[in-house]
Image (cartoon, grey):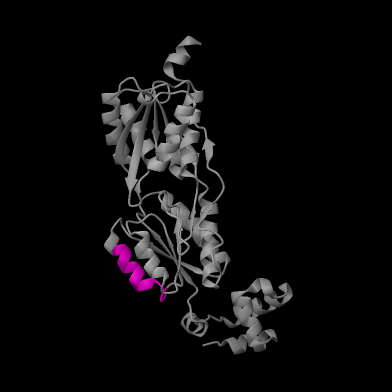
Amino acid sequence: MVTLAEVARRAKVTGATVSNVLRNPQKVKPETVDRVMAAIRELGYRPNLTARALARGRTSTLALMLSNITNPFYPEFVLAAEREARKRGHFLLVCNTDDDPAITRAYLEQIAGSLASGVIVMNTDLSERELTEIASRGIAVVLCMWEHVQPSRALPCVTIDFAAAGALAAEHLSSLGHRKFGALVGAGSGGPQTIRLEGFASALAAHGHADKSLAVVQARDSIEGGYEAAIGLLRDKPGLTCIFATNDLMAIGAMQAAADLGKRVPDDISVIGLTDIELAHQFRPALTTVRLPAAEIAARSIALALEMIEGGEPAQDIYVVRSPELVVRASTGRAPSRRRRT
């Protein structure tokens, strides 16, 4: 097995320089990095990750805990997080908890501090108290994309303004002349997506729409859940001209429900979602949605976890990254009654 010392001799540098190239290349002159990397390739050197972890007292692995890998948002988020971790010289261990608190606890007990030096926790059924106990063992724990989060010095959270996202959807539909609104509110492992609804309802009120103009239905956070909820909503409130779903999967289910009820999107009913998963622009009609800056959230979460691992204290409790963005596509249009008047 090729050793680090052999690489150092081939590159005519010290062993410490080889270590720096592998761990902190930005601290080494570019020409030295090139020479060391050439020696590594020529000799076929592979670092002993276990020995490195023992020597440093921590691993080069971060864990990302998510609730359901079948939700298309999560693979897209994982891709961005993995790229950021790799760029910073770390590996990313992805843990799918399958919306099961017992699996979440088992993962945390088994990987926190041993397989992973830091853990990024997306929506979970675990309480902040339980996660704070994990953090008290010296593990960097970062909450990510939590909609319902209380400021806690022990557990910083990287998220977005979910109320602003809901407000963007409301403003868009109101600007199109809609006056009778429906809302599908999803509930996943992180709890009901009520902050998005609150932002939506507040924006409607600000634009002069009465409370009774909004009909709300709870739904499972999936295409099937959106379909079932929209079928019931449209049958109960046939006069609705638009539906806001608190995530894209339910919005797609709502479009399928509208089609099965003989309604055309957007001619008879407009549909808007929230997230902007890849499927949103691939579906037909393409889904109007509110885009969440997933790549920025992933990068900030990775960076914050690494800062904490290095001994840094979080500068704040809640980090709100770039604002959500309205993405207008084909699933929304002028309200039917308004269209007929023009």
Q: Position of residue 94 (x, y in %)?
A: 41, 63
Q: Position of residue 115 (x, y in %)?
A: 41, 74
> In the rendered image, which quarter is residue 223 located in?
top left
Of 23 and 256, nearer the camera is: 23
> In the rendered image, which quarter is residue 138 located in?
bottom left
* Residue 209 left/right relative to 319: left
The span shown in magenta is 103-115
Identity of the residue drawn at 45% across and 33% down: 202
Identity of the residue drawn at 41% across and 71% down: 136
Magenta stretch, main secondary structure class: helix
Look at the image and say whether residue 107 sits in the magenta stretch: yes
Q: Position of residue 165 (x, y in %)?
A: 48, 40
Q: Is residue 104 above or below residue 19?
A: above
Look at the image and say whether residue 234 sits in the magenta stretch: no
Q: Position of residue 30 (x, y in %)?
A: 72, 72
Q: Is residue 3 above or below residue 211?
A: below
Query: In this orientation, does residue 282 appear?
Result: no
Query: In this orientation, does residue 306 appear?
Result: yes
* Residue 282 left/right relative to 9: left
Identity of the residue drawn at 56% across and 69% down: 312
